[in-house]
Image (tube, coloured by chain):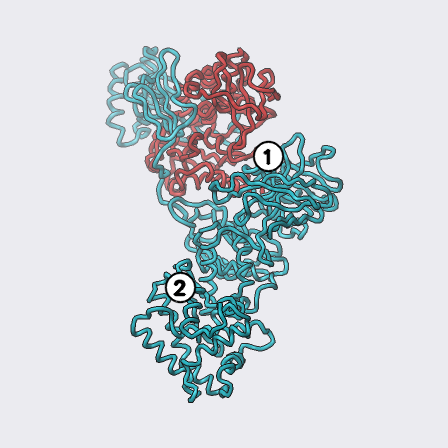
Chain colours: A red, B cyan
């Protein structure tokens, strides 16, 4: 989608405040109509990107979304740049434009355009007081590092599964099992062994995780994939590539990060993860945050470089 | 009925019982009298029945003075009204005679409406042979308008619409007058109404606005040449006829039970082409069982009698669902696809119209891909196209379809000469679709509507500025003239075959807007902002995370949930906001200083004499360069309890600023008293902001003490 399209989508989300998933999808489909998109560039993918960047929250079970409160947060080791995350109403944009004109202690950079997410708005602050004063001027909250705050409270993988138990899926649907060696899907007859299964149901794709006790759990792809990886002991899918400062966290598309882990990683740069082959790459992730993400998912972080 | 003469009172009763009654309560009724109706009521031949009606009203006329011919009838009717209007209006037979004249005139297209009086004269002459046409017309003009108003009074006021509401209108053509208003819409037009209501997607029992129905009826009928001249006249003229037609359409929509009739008055339904699921797709035909079709339907296929059964026909349905008989025992051959198929039985018709391109969407009711009239925007479809038109279809796809469509090639899946394509998604139609691929114009309905856009909450047709909706043009017959489209009075000039006109690229300003499409109009408004910095959320969505013993933290649900509670020992996360519970054991956030990268040196000083930290510039993050960012500053978590920052600049010299208290990471940092004193005493007074000089003075006193 065009960059302006996703910025407009974020403005709409923020001005509207909340809505149904169907409404979000209709808005996205309307905005992207006529654009030359890849088949996977769906409303769901964009919503997850916006959620990872802290712009909105989605209750998939109730098919609702809400815009998040706006927040100014410093990025880790990023030249003292503050990121404007959360909802971005036009009133907030107007105030930021005013601050940009009137205040000499901040420098608003041109928004960084992104292909699969709204533009990132970064503000260079002269000192730490400037950031807090700016947040106060805008009427929003501020934080020294949301990424660090999130990384400190990432839930353990085990805690996601209670309450997700369901009866076994009816036979007759096409069913596939996630192959953990290559993280690809293979056709199977039915649920036989522990792992993550994918069904083509009339209302869309559904995922079921069969645990070691042969109990079926209705999960999403990310939780299901890491739960399956853990019971089979397969590790090493999360890689951290050291850069001179911080590093790049590489995640396989077949096992994307759950919402909070993705948000902790994405808010290290304010940029949506970029696609590289069959991986997603989050940039500027400090080693300790990458390690916290891996630990929460029962994985060992593979350090590279 | 016997051959005895029917008197005026009896005719009045017969006519009233036929045209007005409890079953029409609240709806607009036409007093459409023609010879077949009279024959049916009188139980005799048409000529005889018409003559009987004339004979019946003769006693109510003043035959000795033709100028006052209708005077006695008017007086009788007035007395009837004054006494409360008990029973049917005594003037009803005379009014019926006037309508009969108008209906005769309509049937004979060659005789113009200006000669209505001649038709009326012909009829009245049956009973009053020597009447002068001029005298007749004067008397008619004196009495009939009042008589029509009495009928309206009787229906609308005396019976408050319980027997039906009047559609009597004066009309714009004075010669025809009130009688004509009852004859414009004839029974053949009424049969076609079911086709219009189906086209308009009316749900049985639905209330639709008259103006909207009328506008769409004009568009629907524009390309047709099979409406009666009267109906065409109604559409062409304004005033009473328009209102009357609007009433009729709204009533028809309200009373419609979903039955569609063809031009011969038979219930009809469209067969659907079906495609079973891959990997072994197979074509078939499914027969719907819409209203008007029985649970068991016997019909002939290739000379054999076949019984179709709809077992669930009594089950209630959602408005967008239909009952089905199931699959027809008919092989889908090349001939069936190319020429279509028509099956008849029990006075009903099932029909598959021939097409060059069939569009199939997933049907939840049938559990397979099922043919539809138009592709639906943004929804995956399969396409069955004749091989002759494959290249044309491909070229359309290259322009408008989302990537990912591909041919499905399996031997025997479709008849020879046809090609199956899967994964077709089209969002908007190009301007120049030919008639071959008309089904590829994405549509969800045939109606004019405002679609898409970025709607705002709690208001109808209010959008965010920049998110103006698209105008979806109503479907038109190929031959119909192009509709004029305007936004706020400015012409938008749609091209031939264009389905939608996006308004957002026109960047209409914030405010109210009016879109006109032919006779129809829609209003919408845009707002730039709701004026709040923070999004208005009534039921926030977020994550609740609670303490989970030694293992750390536990999620309370699989993902974000609506209105998560803040656990006392945990946190609640809404986007980038992390709220701590009262008992949450969480380390306080590591606070940072922002320090200048361009200074020669940066020294942090504690208020505790001797404690200081020299801060080196960290490496520039490489990803920032890649993102086009430059670093002027860097953030730093101090090792000491820093109270002051001293920076040394090449051009500006020394600068000192007070810091907010930030606890240091080291509990017992190394002390360097001489260095600390040197830094403090080395800073000139002008390096410190005026309001901070008293505090800095205390620092200097400590430094002097150390020195």
Does the rendering let one see residue B671? no
Query: Is A166 on the left-hand or right-hand side of B339?
Result: left
Q: In this figure, which residue is indicated by the disc labeled 1?
A: A39
Query: Is B665 on the left-hand or right-hand side of B698?
Result: right
Q: Is residue A11 above or below residue A132?
A: below
Which quadrant does the C terminus of chain B fall into? Answer: top left
Percent x, y of residue A89: 40, 40
Q: In which chain is the residue bearing label 2?
A: B
Which quadrant of the figure has residue B153?
bottom left
Of residues A204 and B489, the one nearer the viewer is A204
Q: In this figure, which residue is indicated by the disc labeled 2?
A: B165
Does the rendering let one see residue B267? yes
Percent x, y of residue B432: 65, 52
Q: Which mark is residue A263?
A: none
Of residues A6 and A26, the one nearer the viewer is A26
Q: Residues within 10 Å of mark 2 (few under 14, many from 20)?
A: many
Of residues B705 and B336, the one nearer the viewer is B336
Q: CA distance from mark 1 to mark 2?
A: 56 Å
């Amino acid at each position: 989608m065009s960059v302006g399209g996703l910025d407009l989508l974020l403005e709409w989300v923020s001005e509207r405040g909340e809505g149904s998933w169907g409404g979000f999808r209709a808005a996205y489909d309307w905005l992207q109509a006529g654009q030359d998109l890849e088949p996977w560039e769906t409303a769901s993918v964009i919503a997850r990107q916006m959620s990872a960047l802290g712009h909105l929250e989605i209750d998939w079970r109730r098919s609702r979304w809400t815009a998040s409160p706006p927040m100014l947060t410093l990025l880790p080791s990023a030249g003292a740049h503050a990121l404007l995350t959360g909802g971005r109403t036009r009133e907030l944009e107007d105030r930021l434009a005013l601050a940009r004109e009137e205040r000499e202690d901040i420098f608003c950079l041109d928004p960084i355009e992104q292909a699969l997410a709204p533009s990132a708005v970064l503000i260079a602050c002269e000192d730490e007081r400037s950031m807090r004063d700016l947040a106060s001027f805008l009427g929003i909250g501020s934080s020294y590092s949301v990424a660090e705050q999130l990384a400190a409270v990432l839930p353990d993988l085990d805690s996601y599964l209670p309450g997700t138990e369901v009866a076994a899926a009816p036979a007759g649907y096409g069913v596939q099992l996630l192959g953990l060696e290559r993280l690809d899907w293979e056709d199977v007859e039915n649920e036989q062994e522990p792992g993550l299964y994918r069904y083509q149901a009339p209302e869309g794709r559904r995922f079921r995780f069969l645990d070691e006790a042969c109990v079926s759990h209705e999960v999403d792809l990310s939780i299901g994939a890491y739960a399956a990886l853990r019971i089979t002991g397969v590790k090493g899918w999360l890689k951290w590539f050291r850069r001179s400062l911080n590093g790049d966290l590489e995640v396989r598309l077949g096992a994307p990060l759950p919402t909070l882990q993705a948000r902790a990683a994405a808010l290290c740069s304010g940029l949506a993860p970029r696609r590289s082959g069959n991986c997603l790459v989050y940039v500027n992730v400090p080693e300790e945050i990458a390690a916290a993400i891996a630990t929460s998912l029962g994985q060992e972080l593979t350090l590279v470089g | 009925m016997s051959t005895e003469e029917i008197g005026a009172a009896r005719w009045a009763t017969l006519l009233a019982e036929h045209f007005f009654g409890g079953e029409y309560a609240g709806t607009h009724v036409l007093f459409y009298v023609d010879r077949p109706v009279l024959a049916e009521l009188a139980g005799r031949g048409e000529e005889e029945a018409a003559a009987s009606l004339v004979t019946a009203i003769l006693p109510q006329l003043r035959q000795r003075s033709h100028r006052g011919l209708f005077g006695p009838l008017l007086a009788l009717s007035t007395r009837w009204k004054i006494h409360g209007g008990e029973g049917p209006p005594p003037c009803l037979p005379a009014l019926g005679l006037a309508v009969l004249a108008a209906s005769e005139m309509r049937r004979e297209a060659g005789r113009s409406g200006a000669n209505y009086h001649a038709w009326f004269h012909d009829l009245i002459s049956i009973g009053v042979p020597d009447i002068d046409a001029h005298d007749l017309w004067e008397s008619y003009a004196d009495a009939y308008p009042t008589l029509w108003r009495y009928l309206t009074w009787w229906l609308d006021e005396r019976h408050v619409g319980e027997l039906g509401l009047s559609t009597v209108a004066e009309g714009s053509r004075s010669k025809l007058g009130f009688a004509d208003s009852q004859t414009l819409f004839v029974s053949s037009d009424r049969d076609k109404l079911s086709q219009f209501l189906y086209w308009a997607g009316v749900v049985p029992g639905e209330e639709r606005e008259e103006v909207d129905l009328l506008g769409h009826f004009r568009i629907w009928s524009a390309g047709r040449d099979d409406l009666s001249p009267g109906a065409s006249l109604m559409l062409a003229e304004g005033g009473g006829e328009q209102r009357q037609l609007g009433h009729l359409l709204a009533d028809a929509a309200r009373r419609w039970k979903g039955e569609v009739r063809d031009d011969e008055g038979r219930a009809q339904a469209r067969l659907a082409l079906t495609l079973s699921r891959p990997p072994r797709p197979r074509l078939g035909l499914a027969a719907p069982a819409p209203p008007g079709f029985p649970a068991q339907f016997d019909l002939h296929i290739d000379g054999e009698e076949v019984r179709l059964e709809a077992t669930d026909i009594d089950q209630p349905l959602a408005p967008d669902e239909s009952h089905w008989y199931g699959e027809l025992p008919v092989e889908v051959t090349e001939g069936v696809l190319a020429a279509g198929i028509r099956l008849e039985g029990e006075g009903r018709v099932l029909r598959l119209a021939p097409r060059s391109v069939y569009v199939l969407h997933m049907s939840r009711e049938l559990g397979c891909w099922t043919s539809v009239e138009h592709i639906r925007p943004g929804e995956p479809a399969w396409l069955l196209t004749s091989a002759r038109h494959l290249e044309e279809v491909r070229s359309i796809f290259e322009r408008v379809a989302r990537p990912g469509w591909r041919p499905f090639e399996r031997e025997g899946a479709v008849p020879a000469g046809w090609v199956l394509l899967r994964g077709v998604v089209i969002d908007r139609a190009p301007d120049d679709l030919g008639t071959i691929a008309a089904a590829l114009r994405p549509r969800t309905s045939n109606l004019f509507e405002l679609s898409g856009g970025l709607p705002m909450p709690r208001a109808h047709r209010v959008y965010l500025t920049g998110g103006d909706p698209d105008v979806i043009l109503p479907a038109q017959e190929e031959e119909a003239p192009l509709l004029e489209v305007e936004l706020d009075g400015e012409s938008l000039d749609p091209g031939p075959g264009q389905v939608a006109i996006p308004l957002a690229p026109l960047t209409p300003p914030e405010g109210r807007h009016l879109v006109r499409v032919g006779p129809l109009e829609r209003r919408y408004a845009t707002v730039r902002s709701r004026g709040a910095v923070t999004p208005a959320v009534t039921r926030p969505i977020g994550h609740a995370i609670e303490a989970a013993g030694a293992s750390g933290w536990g999620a309370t649900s699989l993902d974000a949930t609506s209105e998560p509670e803040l656990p006392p020992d945990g946190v609640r996360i809404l986007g980038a906001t992390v709220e701590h519970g009262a008992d949450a054991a969480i380390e306080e956030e590591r606070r940072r200083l922002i320090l200048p990268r361009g200074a020669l040196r940066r020294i942090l000083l504690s208020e505790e004499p001797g404690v200081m930290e020299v801060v080196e510039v960290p490496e520039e993050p490489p990803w920032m360069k890649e993102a086009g960012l430059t670093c002027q500053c860097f953030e730093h978590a101090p090792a000491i309890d820093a109270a002051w920052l001293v920076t040394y600049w090449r051009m500006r010299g020394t600068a000192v600023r007070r810091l907010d208290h930030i606890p240091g990471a080291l509990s017992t940092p190394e002390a360097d008293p001489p260095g600390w004193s040197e830094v403090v005493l080395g800073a000139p007074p002008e390096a410190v902001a005026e309001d901070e000089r008293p505090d800095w003075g205390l620092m200097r006193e400590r430094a002097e003490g150390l020195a």
